Image (tube, grey):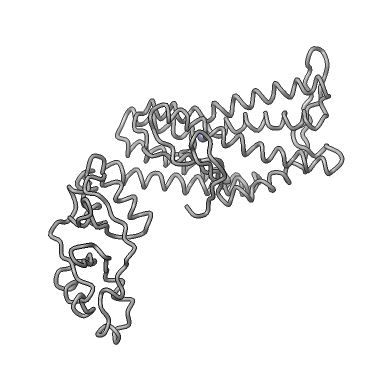
Amino acid sequence: MSSAFSIGRIAGIPIRLHVTFLAIIPFVAYVFTTFTQPFPVKIFGQVFDFAYGFGAVEPSGARWAYSFAFSILLFVCVALHELGHSFVAMRYGIKIRSITLYIFGGVASMEDIPRDPSMEARMAVAGPGVSGIIGVGCTLLSIQSAILLGGGHPLTTLLWTLGVINIVLMIFNLLPAFPMDGGRVLRAWFASRMAYVEATRRAANIGKFFAIMMFFLGLFGGGILLVVIAIFIYIAASDEERSTAIVVPLEGVKVRDIMSVDLKTVSPETPLPEIMNLMFREKHRGYPVLVDGRLAGIVTISDVQRVPEEKREKITVGEIMVKSIYVIEPNADAAEAMKKMMERQIRRLPVMDEGKLVGIVSRSDLLRAIEICSGW
Ligand SMILES: [Zn+2]
């Protein structure tokens, strides 16, 4: 994803920030300078006036400084929450590609989807668990700070606010709004009772329902942030549902099982009218282009259509073929081929075995395989 950039690594996991997250840091800092919520607590017979929010911190320079520090620490807490998920996942041998922080929280991108319900449930709970521990830890520290520095001290306020928000984070993430953590626990619960795709569909529908509720709650008084989070959850739930419906039925299917092997290839010298005839006759929409038996490019019907009709006579395949080609091995998973095509927005992949072109796999090959495997 190009709208996110890397800021470093923890335990070998690249931590990435999505651009939306950058906007949220000053926004959160600003919001927390605007209010204060007093919270008197009696400790050892003495009353301490804890405050949630930095609105009462004076002077304004200190108010902003503490609020900014809070905002950045909050982002560290979200990253730690994701690391909680990631460490449990790594214990099960799952590789973590990256952790990306979005406006609504973090997402750990994993090599494999855990398909074991109890494993997924444990992974899902680990994140809110970390938030809970941080929340309780900060609250205890704020009590210590209140005893030493006073309840109204900005440091006490910082610790108290962090403590409260982490506990809120824990509760919010445990809502059964898939793909949030609580929703994943819910899917794991469904998955122990029914097929994985069906379990995902149900959890996603509940997630979407929650998203719609949040959307209207945000619209009528809950605030714009809730509306944005609702939209993100809705999109994420739909995405996860769709990709699960595609990837799961293809499990165990290899590229070699579904690729087309009756290979028609063309040379770069082929004139365009000739290849158009070929496409028309054989009903293939794309052809690998070979030079001395080596794959040099790929030419598709849309490449040809981009050339104005009157110019096609004088142009050859070599001039319009796509040279930067993504290929796949025959032993690769069909799901990987599908992922590659969706990411690069292409419709076919040449299949290469030790540098030799052995076949071609297209989206229609994959869709046929999905249909057959899932018995639609
Ligand atoms: Zn989480």
Going by the picture, which residue comes out furthest to the bottom? 310
- 250 up-or-down from 282: above or below: above
Number of numbered discs present? Answer: 0
Q: Quadrant of residue 113?
A: top left
| Foreground residue among 26 and 221 | 26
Q: Quadrant of residue 274?
A: bottom left
Where is residue 20 drawn, in percent x and y? 58, 50
Going by the picture, which residue comes out furthest to the top? 44
Residue drawn at the location 53% of the way across and 41% of the way down: 15
Residue drawn at the location 38% of the way across and 39% of the way down: 111
| Foreground residue among 370 and 211 | 370
Where is residue 205 drawn, in percent x and y? 42, 42
Left/right of residue 323 with respect to residue 39 in the rendered view = left
Going by the picture, which residue comes out furthest to the left? 262
Where is residue 171 drawn, in percent x and y? 57, 30
- 179 up-or-down from 136: above or below: below
Q: Is residue 371 visible?
A: no
| Foreground residue among 265 and 40 | 265
| Foreground residue among 184 and 122 | 122
Q: Quadrant of residue 156?
A: top right
Going by the picture, which residue comes out furthest to the front? 292
Where is residue 251 drawn, in percent x and y? 26, 40
Residue drawn at the location 78% of the way across and 16% of the way down: 43
Left/right of residue 142 with respect to residue 222 in the rendered view = right
- 122 up-or-down from 106: above or below: above
Residue drawn at the location 31% of the way across and 57% of the way down: 326
Q: Is residue 267 visible?
A: yes
